[in-house]
Image (spheres, grey):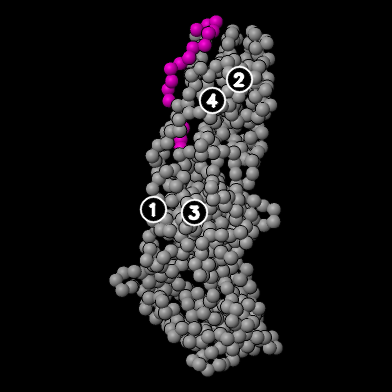
Amino acid sequence: MRFVRPSFSSFQVPHASQSESASVHPARLRARVARAMATMRPSVLDTCSTSLRGPSKDRLRQRSTIGPSIHHRVGPHGVADVVPDLPFKDSGLDPTTFGVGPETGSVGKGNVAGKLAIDVIATDGHRRAETTCKRGASSGNCVESGRETAMETCRRAWRAEGARLGRAAGVRPSRRKGRWEGLQCRAATAPGRKRGKESICVVGGGFGGLLTALKLDSFLWPDGKPNIVLVNREERFLFKPLMYDYLTGECDVNDVAPRFEDLLESTSIEFCRGEVSGIELQQTTGEGVLSVGKDQSVPFDHLVVAVGASTRFPSGVPGARELAVPFSTFDDMLQVENSLKDLEGRSGPCKVAVAGGGVAGVELACAVASCLKNRPDATVLLLSGSAEVMEKCPAGHREAAKAEMKELGVEVLDTARVLSVEEVESQKQVHINLGGEERVIDTDLLLWTVGQAPATADLGGSYVFPVNDKGSIKTDPYLQVEGQSNVFALGDASFQAPEVSPYIATAQVALQQSDFCAYNIWASMNGRKLVPFRYMHLGDMMTLGRSTAAITLPLGSGFTLDGILASLGRKIAYVIRQPTLQQQGRVGRGLLEREGGEAGKALGPLLQLFATEADKLLQQSRA
């Protein structure tokens, strides 16, 4: 919300010379001072009490919380010009007493007394407030020395209070142009809870969680932007579709896993790294506290659960947890990279087995085969538990994957169910059931892509939200957790009845849910109508090794494009899907320099510079 100052009728201060009078509107000044007094320390009130005339400090504090709340019906991207019309009649305050306007009495020619104002915009019923401290001073020659001393004492106390608020907020003083040079500050009393503001806590830094937080930060809030806290156990955001490109050397680590500090640098989002150990929620008020680690607590008024999914090894497969390597996290990606480098430098034949015949298993098998392509004695084996790989994907997708796996030399075993895994003489022996017959496969590396389950079990022992048999949080069509109006869930950790939204949990679903989740939180906090989530399928993309991919668009029965053009289109799409403009510039620059030759190397830095400047302009326009 943008607050503007309309033109008011002027208030003429008695002065020795009419040509040197100043114009001040008493209503605005009395309202500012009355509301500001409610937030001042008692010591400041006591210091300024000698300059008060009329009601006592307690009456001022009580009167400052009274007044109509003005809410304009504007959207999160709209702009409203609102000036609160607070009651000031009979407030008993003299604006000149606080140095806001010219002082009472004779003023030397050419000099104006010190000016000081503290604007406090508050809505007591919703515990929202935004404090802006404006400080400016110029010399003044008062004839009444006693009056001047009292004013200077009060003025110094108020300036000290503004400095205290700035230190508490942990922000640097920023000089700004205008009628008064000022110091902007926001009071903060605890992580995730700034004075008078509501707090939104987002648990999980995947696609759903990060994009929800970024969209909430980009909205315009009529009553002031709430505090937004993002909690994640890792320090890096993982763009999972590019994990396979990292193995094949088509992107670097900062493209696939940028740090949250870099992504959130130009936003007001607070990042809290740690593992959630518990959630306490008060049913009466809806407020809660998130326990992070051993000694951190994050209070919230609204909670978003977007913890995603994690690898769950089946308990009926002995040795899988200890000997198989999953491919789901940033550490898993680095471990697989190091294992492949060891196999590349090793002499003699080598074999890598990939368990899982879904999209993730096929993409990983093709990436591994591309890395070991220079070794003719290397074997890549794909163990598919179903009768056909990628059986739930479009037919064009399956045919393109089969053709590329045949080109790369990937052997596919259909209806192969892993029974157990054991290690014998530095090799893994994988016992499988293949068509009712038990076989043993010796392999140097076993990669695991099956058994993904919602990571809701990682939220601590006090986690009490309703879940289905798989551990997914039950939500209504508005992504609100059942029975909780201020708790939302999305991504792999959420579940809706198939008749409401028939879809499977993918990154594309989480991306679309983040839009609805962010808007519904904004709507619930501003008295608007919530919008039910509806999924729109935009097609399927997958990588099939180095510089090869497949894209299936939902046109008719499905149009599939594969090969180099599909690989380029997939990479461009993922550049656009990066969470921030700056990250889009970084990833786009790397793509141009790798794929564009000499021209790309020249255009890459320009693209990154353009994205950085565009991000700065966007942040300035929002401010």
Q: Of the residues shown, which amino acid type is indicated by label 3?
A: Gln
Magenta residue check for 8: yes
Q: Which residues are magenta?
A: 1-18
Find the distance from the CA under tag 2 to the CA under tag 4.
Answer: 11 Å
Q: How many marks?
A: 4
Find the distance from the CA under tag 4 to the CA under tag 3.
Answer: 35 Å
Residue 118 shows which numbered tag?
Answer: none
Q: Residues within 10 Å of mark 3 (few under 14, many from 20)?
A: some
Find the distance from the CA under tag 1 to the CA under tag 4.
Answer: 39 Å
Kindly state the secondary structure of the residue where label 1 is placed.
loop
Mark 1 in CB contact with mark 2 (< 8 angstroms): no
Kindly state the secondary structure of the residue where label 2 is placed.
loop
Would you name the residue on which mark 3 appears?
484
What is the residue that sits farthest to the front in this orientation? 284
Residue 531 shows which numbered tag?
Answer: 1
Nearest the viewer among 425 and 140 is: 425
Q: For residue 504, what is the image quadrant?
A: bottom left
Residue drawn at x 59%, y 70% is 333
Task: Tell me: residue 107, above or below residue 358.
Answer: above
Residue drawn at x 43%, y 58% is 476
Kindly state the secondary structure of the residue where label 4 is placed.
helix
Picture coordinates of residue 494, whole percent (x, y)? 48, 63
Kindly state the secondary structure of the residue where label 3 is placed.
loop
Q: Earlier in the sequence, mark 1 or mark 3?
A: 3
Nearest the viewer among 385 and 619 is: 385
Q: Residues within 10 Å of mark 4 (few under 14, many from 20)?
A: many
Q: Of the residues shown, which amino acid type is indicated by label 1?
A: Val
Q: Of the residues shown, which amino acid type is indicated by label 2?
A: Ser
Would you name the residue on which mark 2 appears?
56
Q: Earlier in the sequence, mark 2 or mark 4?
A: 2
Q: Of the residues shown, which amino acid type is indicated by label 4?
A: Arg
